[in-house]
Amino acid sequence: MGFLQKYPFFCDCVNLPEDLVEALVELKETAEDLDYEEFLRYVAEEQLEDFGFDPPLNEDWSVSFGMGSFDGWPCVFFVHSGIEHLFVAEDYTSMGGPQPPPEQSYLKKVL
């Protein structure tokens, strides 16, 4: 099995730039469900600690996980308390995609 680059946190739906709302709607309509272990194939567990959820995501029965395409880029996400948290492939912002909103950049962690 080859090395899989972990996806960085991009944004949550509350702070999503308005011009990307339709991309989120399309993602939600076409996403595949993931379980927590599958989600961790794409996201470093250490990134999730930055959110500070209690109980942790893997112990919270109300959290769901998914994957799909966001604005044409591979994406995984989780939904906690009705809020989507998006992790988009590393190249998204460096290849012309928008930068994460400044108010959420503290969550983006370089691993």
Image (cartoon, rainbow, N blue to C red):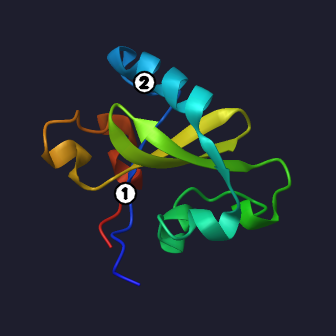
Q: Nearer the viewer, residue 72 or 24?
A: 72
Left or right: residue 80 versus residue 88 is right
Residue 46 located left or right of residue 102: right
Residue 43 is situated, as x and y percent measured from the top left of the image, at: 48, 64
Residue 34 place in picture, x, y as percent: 66, 56
Which three-letter amino acid code belongs to the residue tagged 2? Answer: Ala
Q: Residue furthest front?
A: 1
What secondary structure is marked by label 2? Answer: helix
Residue annotated with mark 1: 8
Q: Residues within 10 Å of mark 2 (few under 14, many from 20)?
A: some
Tell me if residue 94 comes above or below residue 31 in the rendering: below
Does residue 75 appear to the left or right of 32 in the view shown?
left
Residue at position x 79%, y 62% in the image: 55
The residue that appears at 81% across and 57% down in the rendered structure is 60
The residue drawn where x is 65% and y is 71% is 37
**Where, by quadrant of the figure, is residue 28 drawn?**
top right
Quadrant location of the C terminus in the rendered image: bottom left
For the N terminus, the image quarter is bottom left
Residue 50 x/y as whole percent? 51, 62
Report the number of numbered marks: 2
> Which residue occupies the foreground of this view, 45 or 23?
23
Image position, residue 51 (x, y; %): 57, 56
Residue labelled with disc 2: 23
